[in-house]
Every structure is written in C-alpha cells, then in structure tokens.
Image (cartoon, rainbow, N blue to C red):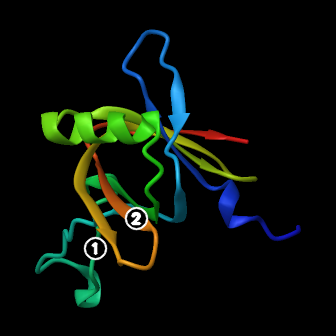
Amino acid sequence: MAGQKGRDVLIKIGDGGGPEVFTTVAGIRAKTIALNAKSVDGTSGESTSAWRELIAGAGVKSASVSGAGVFKDAASDATLQSVFFAQSSRTFQLVIPSFGVLQGPFLIEALEYSGDHDGEAAFSISLVSAGVISFTAT
C-alpha cells in the first residue's frame, strides 16, 4: 500500500442543518486525531496470581482533534468562532484517507490566533468529543 498524503486528512464542520452539510475547515496544515479508550481495573484479592484483570467495555471512550494552519478568514472560520463563543457542540467529520470517516459531536476546547509581524496570521484549534462518534470505513 502506498503512503497517504497528509493534506488529504480533513477536518469538516457541519452547518447544523438537516440534512447536515459539511465544510472543510480552511487553512489547516497540520492535523492530529486521537482516539482513546480508558480501561477499568477489576483486579481483586481473588485475581489469579495477582495478575491485573480489566473489565471489558467498562471504560470511557473519547476522541480529541487538534489542527493548526493559516488564518484564511473563510466562512468556516466564522462558523468556528460562533460555535466556540456559544460553547455548543457541533457535528464534525474527520476524514482519514484509505481508512474512513469519523463523525459526531465535538466541542471546541481551544481556538488560538497568532502571527509574527513578518509572517502569516495563524490559528490553532482543539476539539473534544461530546457524544457518540461513528466510524464509516472507506
């Protein structure tokens, strides 16, 4: 299998409508998607030879997303700002080439802007899952 292009990893925000229409977040250069599943330790005095026992399916699953790039002042930026200040969850799609699409509600945990006097205006965003995340393989 050939390597995949990082630029094909996409973060898309939904418009909240029905049916939902998704727009790619403009200007993002670097993206990280992390899926987590915490374990629950069920070890007790009766555990065989004191080996740790984990309780299957008892932990909390979560997803976090971070991205950084060039501020483009596109429609997606206005949507991000609006959702951040309202602190409401919004449906996002996370597209991972030759793997699949993750979709579900996220809260914008951080929205940062920066810029050097001789460089571009930049921004970064951090998202945290706020409900069930579905996965569709591609």
Residue at image point 18% right, 75% down: 43
Residue 53 figure quarter: bottom left
> Against 117, is 136 above or below?
above
Q: Position of residue 56 (x, y in %)?
A: 34, 57
Q: Is residue 132 visible?
A: no
Single out the mark in the foreground, 2 or 1: 2
Tell me if mark 1 has few (under 14), some (14-19) or many (20+) residues whose alpha carbon lies within 10 angstroms of its own. Answer: some
Residue that extends furthest to the top in the rendered view of this protein:
18
Residue 91 figure quarter: top left
Q: Is residue 129 visible?
A: yes
Residue at image point 33% right, 52% down: 57
Residue at image point 44% right, 28% down: 14
Q: Nearer the viewer, residue 108 or 54?
A: 108
Residue beneath label 1, please? 53
Residue that extends furthest to the bottom in the rendered view of this protein:
49
Q: Is residue 18 left or right of residue 113?
A: right
Label 1: element kind = loop
Residue beneath label 2, please? 121
Q: How many marks?
A: 2
CA distance separating discs 2 and 1: 50 Å
The three-letter code of the residue at mark 1 reads Glu
Numbered badge on residue 70? none
> Against 37, is 24 above or below?
above
Q: Position of residue 50 (x, y in %)?
A: 22, 88
The three-letter code of the residue at mark 2 reads Ala
Q: Position of residue 73 (x, y in %)?
A: 42, 45
Name which of mark 2 and mark 1 comes first in the sequence: 1
